[in-house]
Image: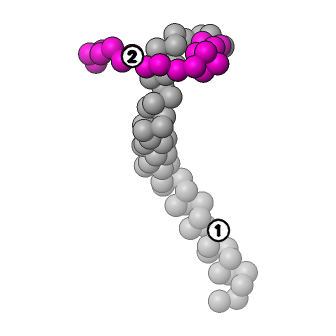
Amino acid sequence: MAKTQLNVRVDEGTTRAARERALARGMSVNRYIEELVRQDAGEAGRAFVEAAADFMERYESVFAAEFDGAEREGTREGGR
């Protein structure tokens, strides 16, 4: 992806906090800010939903078998 430069002005405390947090995560300040914006824009949420959908697609039959069996057991025990 092509990069573009964005200049912003923030107070010294914000600058210090961004540098410290980026360093603690082992990344550049640029990458740290990029990730914050992506998270805020919902990309992380979409990635989670896509991963959850993939998981359910892969294991749907396992869950269906488990819950179908549990429902039958409940029906028999409940006397319905």
Left/right of residue 3 with respect to residue 46 in the rendered view: left
Residue 8 placed where, x, y %? Answer: 43, 19
- Residue 27 part of the magenta segment: no
In the image, residue 17 lies in the stretch drawn in magenta:
yes
Seen in the image, is 16 located left or right of residue 32? right
Residue wearing tag 1: 70
Residue 49: where, in percent of width, then height? 46, 46
Q: Earlier in the sequence, mark 1 or mark 2?
A: 2
* Residue at 52% over, 61% down: 64
Q: Are there few (<14), some (14-19), or many (20+) residues within 10 Å of tag 2?
A: few
Placement of 15 over or under 71, stated as above or below: above
Q: Which residues are magenta?
A: 1-21
Element type at mark 2: loop
Q: According to the image, label 2 marks what residue?
A: 7
Element class at badge 1: helix
Residue 78 x/y as whole percent: 71, 84
Q: Quadrant of residue 1?
A: top left
Instruction: Identify residue type, mark 1.
Output: Ala
Q: Is residue 21 visible?
A: no
At 52% from the left edge and 10% from the top edge, which residue is drawn? Answer: 28
Q: Residue furthest right?
A: 77
Residue at the left extreme? 2
Depth order, front residue of 22/6: 6
- Residue at the spot x=30%, y=16% of the render? 4
Left-right relation of 59 to 22:
left
Tell me which corner region of the image, top left, top right, bottom left or bottom right, holds residue 77: bottom right
Residue 4, labelled with which disc? none
Q: Please, which residue is most extreme toward the bottom here?
A: 80
Q: Nearer the viewer, mark 1 or mark 2?
A: 2
| The C terminus: image quadrant | bottom right
* Amino acid type of the residue that numbered disc 2 sits on in the rendered structure: Asn
